[in-house]
Image (cartoon, grey):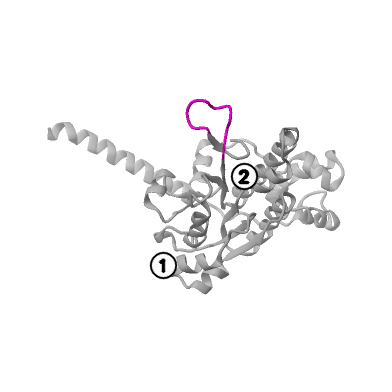
Amino acid sequence: MSKSRAPRRRISEQEDEFEEELIRKLSSEERPAPQFDLEDIEGVGRITAEKLRKSGYVTLKDVAFASVRELAEVIGSEERAKSIILSAQKLLGGGRHFITAKEYYEQRRGISYISTGCRALDELLEGGVETKAVTEFIGEFGAGKTQLCHQLCVMVQLPPEKGGLSAGAIYIDTEGTFRPERIIQIARHRGLDPEEALQNVIYARAYNSDHQMLLVDEAKKVIEERPIRLVVVDSLVSHFRAEYPGRELLATRQQKLNRHVHQLLSLADIYDVAVVVTNQVVASPDVFWGNPLKPAGGN
């Protein structure tokens, strides 16, 4: 029996050595990225840069990953928008659209996780809520979605060895359910100073869907100025459902909601933050077998 186990142990050790060597090489190749302003983009002067910033394009990455149509709405020309986007992409990395799997592996190594404070939930999420991604928590009214959002706002402030990222959070509240008293209670339980914990949560109340989308754009400026690693939208679709009722407005609602989701995905990826959204469930009347509940606003 010892003979049959020995080869497997040597193979495992070789695999570990290979992994360590690969990570060491990748780490040694890391270089600090140069910093650019919008005015450094070819074709962008002071006036154009101000227009871009007012429209939510704060950093070079915002411009580089924008769609031509959306940028054209700001500067008034699709051809010019296309040229500016290409120039921004070149400043970021030579305009390369393809990378090697090794380079992508290096990028993936930068993903971090925020513990939810619940071991079972962390296991389901394979480590917690991850950065560069949007995580949606769905459930019926009173299921604890908002409580989880409050807890994450505190957990992200903990050091990495305790499941956090030593950073702050942005909380966009669409239903008026945010309670700073809860932050104080959770902070005390986790051994944090309550006053400092409150200072590290940046709060905004969204009063309609347009305001909600505007706040996400404004969040970019906050992230540029403060160490933010978590953005919460609680809840995602409540304003959209209230403003676009009925089947005749369903297509319009979904188009706008899709733009908002894309906005959040870009925010997560470009700024390396974890985006958490909540959503209620609704009963589907055309389901006769299985669970009739589905996320409000569609999948």
Residue shown at 68% from the left, 39% from the top: 258
Number of residues whose C-alpha sits closer than 10 Å to that of mark 1, classed few (under 14), some (14–19) or many (20 or more): few
* Residue 194 rendering spot, x and y as whole percentages: 49, 72
Q: Total marks drawn?
A: 2
**Pair 1/2: label in front:** 1
* Mark closer to the chain start, 1 or 2: 1
Residue shown at 67% from the left, 59% from the top: 205
* Residue 262 rendering spot, x and y as whole percentages: 66, 42
Vertical position of residue 11 compared to residue 53: above or below? above
Residue shown at 79% from the left, 39% from the top: 69
Of the pair 292 and 95, the residue shown nearer to us: 292
Number of residues whose C-alpha sits closer than 10 Å to that of mark 2, classed few (under 14), some (14–19) or many (20 or more): some
The magenta stretch spans residue 252: no
Q: SS class of the residue under badge 2?
A: helix
Pointer 2: what residue? 265
Any mark on residue 286, and which? none
* Residue 130 rendering spot, x and y as whole percentages: 50, 48
Residue 90 can be seen in this image = no
Q: Quadrant of residue 257?
A: top right
Residue 92 can be seen in this image = yes
Q: Is residue 21 left or right of residue 151?
A: left
Pointer 1: what residue? 189
- Magenta residues span 282-292
> Which amino acid type is shown beneath numbered disc 1?
His
Q: CA distance from mark 1 to mark 2?
A: 32 Å
